[in-house]
Image (cartoon, grey):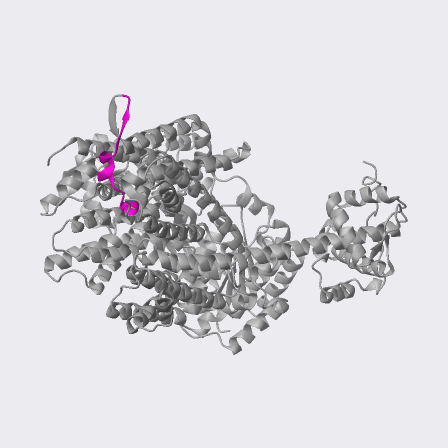
Amino acid sequence: MMMDRFMRVLMLADYNTRIVMFGTVLLGIAGGVVGTFLLLRRRALLADAVSHAALPGVVGAFLLAVAVGTGGRSLPVLLAGALVSGLLGMGCVMLITRFTRLSQDAALGIVLSVFFGFGAALLGIVQKMRGAQAAGLNSFIYGSAASMIRTDALLIGLAAAVVVVLAALLFKEFRLLTFDPAFAAGDGWPVGRLDLLLMSLVVAITVLGLQAVGIVLVIAILIVPAASARFWTESLLVMVLVAALIGAVGSYLGTAISALAPRLPAGAVIVAALGALFLVSFLFGGSRGVVRAMITRSRVIRRTVRQNLLRVLYECEESGLDHDADEQMRYLSASRRWTPRTLRRMLRRLEREQLVYRVPGEQRQLTRTGRYEAMRITRNHRLWEVYLLEHADTAAAHVDHGADSIEHVLGDALVAELEEAVPRFGKTLPQSPHALVQEEQGGGS
Amino acid sequence: MQHDAPALHIRDLTVAYHRKPVLWDVDLDVPPSVVAGIVGPNGAGKSTLIKAVLDLVPRTSGVVEVFGRPYRRQRRLVGYVPQRETVDWDYPINALELVAMGLYRIIGWCRPVTAAYRTRALEALEEVGMAEFAHRQISRLSGGQQQRIFLARALVQDADVYFMDEPFAGVDAGTEKAIIAILQRLRERGKTVFVVHHDLETVREYFDYLVMLNMRVVAAGPARDVFTSENLKRTYGGRLTLLDRAVDAIGGSSS
Amino acid sequence: MIWTSLDSWIVIAAALAGASAALVGAFLVLEKMSMMGDAISHAVLPGIAIAFILTGSRVGGPVLVGAAGFGVLASMLVHVVRRSGRLDDGAAMGVVFTVLFAVGLILIEQAARHVDIHPDHVLFGSVELVPLTVVEIGSMVIPRGVAVLAVVLFVDLVVVILFFKELRLVTFDPALATTLGFNATWLHYLLMTLVALTTVAAFEVVGSILVIAMLVVPGAIAHLLTRRLAPFLLVSVASAVLAAAIGHVAAITVPLRFGFEDTNTAGAMATVLGLLFFTALLVAPERGLLTRAWTMLARRMIVRTQDVLGLLARASERSDGDGLSVNEFRTVHRSPFAARATGLRVGLMLSRIRGFVRREHGRYRLTERGRAAARRVLRVHRLWERFFHDVGKVGLIDLHPAADYLEHYTDAELRDELEKEFAGTDTDPRGNPLP
């Protein structure tokens, strides 16, 4: 039966659920889109101050409505109150940063906590009022996505859609503003007004999200999808789309779950769903994800070690060093500060690839294929060294190091270009421009 | 061009941060078609001069005219290359998109960047030798390459007067030569370029006009005339200590 | 208003919570990490919730440990997210604390089935309930919350006193700390642990969001009032304690005046802190907005007076002692009053009040006292012209405006230096005598 209810919700079987979903998912999309620009403008926490500053406005509007005699719980009235005090809060943040030497984050903390405290004091009054339905206000603090009434959800959804359309129209302008406001101003764009516009959209999303997500956590729908999207892409357009998608999925899941378990605070459920999506992005994101970065790094390290090892082996051969097995191990491990374990593992791998062979008790030797591969690597390295020497005024002493770090990422195209830039070697192997064997400093001590 | 007015005319420009003067009574007339270096010690107000001209910092007083008319009405004739450190190079944007920003003013509000504009951006990238990096994310470019695409963005603005804030800071020798070549081409096309510069050794080689600045304009004119040891001493040799004290007094009494 | 021992305990608990939060929060403000307090105070929630679920109790050791653990965890997570995502501080914090807080809220909702706890306690605190749970220490019966807070305040105090030198170094002179090779990392995490610990202890009293008011606002008030660490901490703690007392009184009295019942103390405390901050913002010595406005007004009044004296001094050089009429004041060469009728009125009025100037037949003349003062003004003006001309190589035409500006900002010390610089000179660059 539980499963049955679950499917009904997920499939949007009820008309009511469908409308609520419409509202929250559009809100999620709008949050992702606007949040991306907010994040790139580096003002993420400003939204937090704004949302907390909305509390006295909500409660104040409620008190006012009760006093006038309209019962109080009308969404547009409460949201208008939230808007006014949210904007007031934002104004205070700007005032404090402008007229004191306090840092912006202190200003945020002050506004956030003092406004919220004042709201809490007002709320304390409301909760003890007879006959007033203070319970409705609770949904503004913790969010109550599933129990939203139809007209409220429609209002929120449509307003969010308007925000998305505005952000899409101003995509280019917001990119300019968030990337390089100084250039934008020099180019004649009204940077101050653009900034105000972006912040107004932020305030709009914050206020619209109060009902569904609640004051405490509403900034999550702005920050978390955008921050998650950052791990997937290096293109702004894609980032906006991914953030919108994550916002939509998070809101959808959160709303569905909280429809099934109405005891749970809806805002917290939505944010937890977004948090799960963030974790996935953080770990597996295609651009900055931790796992991918780790794989790339270990692959580069492995390739670097392999190429260096082959080159050292080749250069030993080239300069006719004759070691026994132990001496060779000591020499190799000292030449690049490899630990004996890394070295042995690498050598075993080379043996498996049949690039290196060993006769027990003697030093390891390159096979024919091994020598060819080692020559290719050494050649690239030296071409690069010569190029650096001749074209970048790099002192010879630094060449080896610079060549080491770059050759491992050289593609074929770049090697061809190198050959062109240093043409006198043709397809031959140039001499190393610096002394090869470091005077046995590796072998002995 | 029909302009016979100076490319840049500044009269009585004073700029103060927190009421503490940074630039005092700057007067300047620079003819068109020159590459003008702005030199002076740290804290002399070089960047501030550019920013004040471009209305990026509030002026306490003064008039700025470009080709004989107030700057505000001549904005479309002016291009700007900010300092490289002022932007977040981790921003999700590639070189081509960055250069296309220079066209936004021409494209206008709310209109998308179409293929034709992208082609123009690509041409500018070609001009600075960066075409092959068009689709690379900007954090994966070297300092010199970043500076080149900044320059390309200014080129597509197709301005008549350019202001460049330390374009040579932290770039390799190759890029420096390339930038200089581009500046000279701009001058040949009749453009006027202002460059905030640090390296005195290259002044004579790079610039045909020079503004020596230390809170006031110490000297301004053709580089070969004004780049003298006397002027250098007046620009760089010891600040006027009494004046410094006065400046401090003004700053301290009001902020 | 009926004041009972319950009220006293509430104020004591709130004051203790405020004092310890203000003590550690002061360092957050100084290190420009105020929002880290916000992040930590949200992020400790899962730790508290887990401790609830495991022990079934709302206070006590496990809760403190769980919370402190999650506090430190949160600050590390912020670090990791910021590094690998190359996000800015705010965004990284925003992600970490919202998600942790959400998880905490859900866990609390689960815990609420077993323990008497409601999310409202978490958000707004429940200082009103503090006196209801008591412990016996020796022969004294005191509320358990008060005992816990007293211990935490003690710990905070001990740490701050022990590491006072290091903290001062790191917060006031990070550059020097670096050159001394002082490693601030451990101090940073020590501070974060203290913040987490204090946050949790104060949690019960003020809740997770209002604790930010306790952490940040007292420090911000101190920031407006002083620049030295010891007074800074003192002001910070004092304003928190003051807010606790006023806040509670306000909570049980103010709403009654408007025909409502009382409200919660924590909210009122935060409001009072906000008002204290606003007051400090207006009237802080040196940096208060009103103070600064007053200073500027006073400065402008001095400038106007000196302008009047300067014009009269020049006039008396030309035509001996004839003075100037109001009209002449505005029309003489380079008059600073050309476009400032009000300025002139103010300047004349002030000059007359101070006995520098008297009025006869519609003309203003210098008095004996005024003559001396006017000479000083004119002398400084011409010395500056001398200076700009000789040292600054400024052309004659440009001399006057700069000197006109500077003459008003020249204090006795600066004047002595000018005098020294031009000891042998007795004329200005145009050849006018130095009076």
Q: Quadrant of residue C381?
A: top left
Question: Which residue appears at 19% of the width and 57% of the height?
Answer: A61
Q: Is residue A33 left or right of residue C109?
A: right
**Along the line of sight, the residue nearer the viewer: A19 or A115:** A19
Specify start and end residues of the magenta stretch as a single range.
Answer: C121-138
Residue at the bottom extreme of this rendering: B116
Q: Is residue C129 left or right of residue B62?
A: left
C17 is within the stretch colored magenta? no
- Percent coordinates x, y for residue C199 in the rendering: 35, 39
Question: Which residue appears at 58% of the width and 70% of the height?
Answer: B124
**Along the line of sight, the residue nearer the viewer: A406 or C76:** C76
- Percent coordinates x, y for residue C126 in the rendering: 25, 41
**Along the line of sight, the residue nearer the viewer: C272 or A136:** A136
Tell me the quadrant of the picture where the C terminus of chain C can be found.
top left
Q: Is residue A285 left or right of residue C402?
A: right
- Percent coordinates x, y for residue C107 in the rendering: 36, 50
